[in-house]
Image (tube, rainbow, N blue to C red):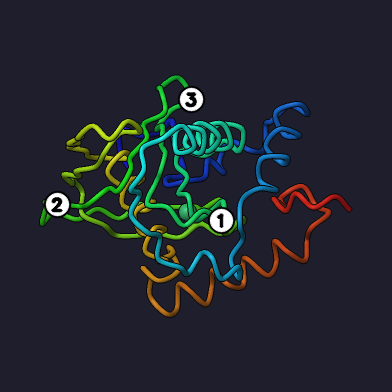
Amino acid sequence: MSGESEHPTDADEHAGETEELDEETRARRDAALRHVRRLGDPVLRAKALPVERFDAELREEARRMGELMHDALGVGLAATQVGILHRLLVYATSAEEPVTVLVNPELGWVSEEREAAEEGCLSIPGVHVEVERPARVRVTARDVHGGELEIEAEGLEARVIQHEIDHLDGVLILDRISREARRDAMRALREAREGRSDERALDPTPA
Ligand code: ZN
């Protein structure tokens, strides 16, 4: 996407940067990724339920998700990806930006203009696919205290929000691409799994 050169990969994974990671950052990322559910886990296909209680437990979930996302070098994370069926997502389109938490997000208006860009997903490591989505969106949500939020987003932010709301509905990037693209993606995924020991593999399982 033009103007987003800092983020070669959109949505919840910053894969373009992983090759130059120092050991400590890599170890922290791998530890965080152990908490993220992978493609094949049925929870990723479940529809999350609206949050009704804006309590300390919710705030702790959001805090923990923000931490995991940061450590995993992601730009977004949905609760379903950590096995929690709450309509809750976090995102930060750059490491310097504070984490935004959206509870019970609803896509309102979306632009007719659509944009295609590459996306990765922490739940589908090793796979990057071009996904077309509305370029601009308006989203309503609650914050962790139950306060009303309305966000207008474009560019990477709009993309991440849509990617994460998809997760809350059990929808993955593989569902948003053509059959041919999906076939190529599945091949890349198999190769990433088989090449577990090589440098490219993102699978955090030791040995
Ligand atoms: Zn994802």
Vertically, is 115 above or below 74?
below
* Amino acid bearing label 2: Gly
- Left or right placement of residue 183 versus residue 31 in this view: left
Q: What element carries label 2?
A: strand
Residue 138 position, x and y percent, is 16, 44
* Amino acid bearing label 3: Ala
Mark 3 or 1 closer to N-term? 1
Q: What element carries label 1?
A: loop
Do the residues under discs 2 and 1 have CB atoms within 8 angstroms? no
Residue that mark 1 sits on = 83
Q: Is mark 3 on a helix, strand or loop?
A: loop
Residue that mark 3 sits on = 95
Residue 65 position, x and y percent, is 52, 38
Q: Mark 2 packing: few (<14 Cα in 10 Å), some, or many (20+)?
A: few
Residue that mark 2 sits on = 108
Vertically, is 31 above or below 122?
above
Q: Which residue is drawn at 56% across and 71% down?
A: 42
For this rendering, which residue is in front, 111 or 48? 48
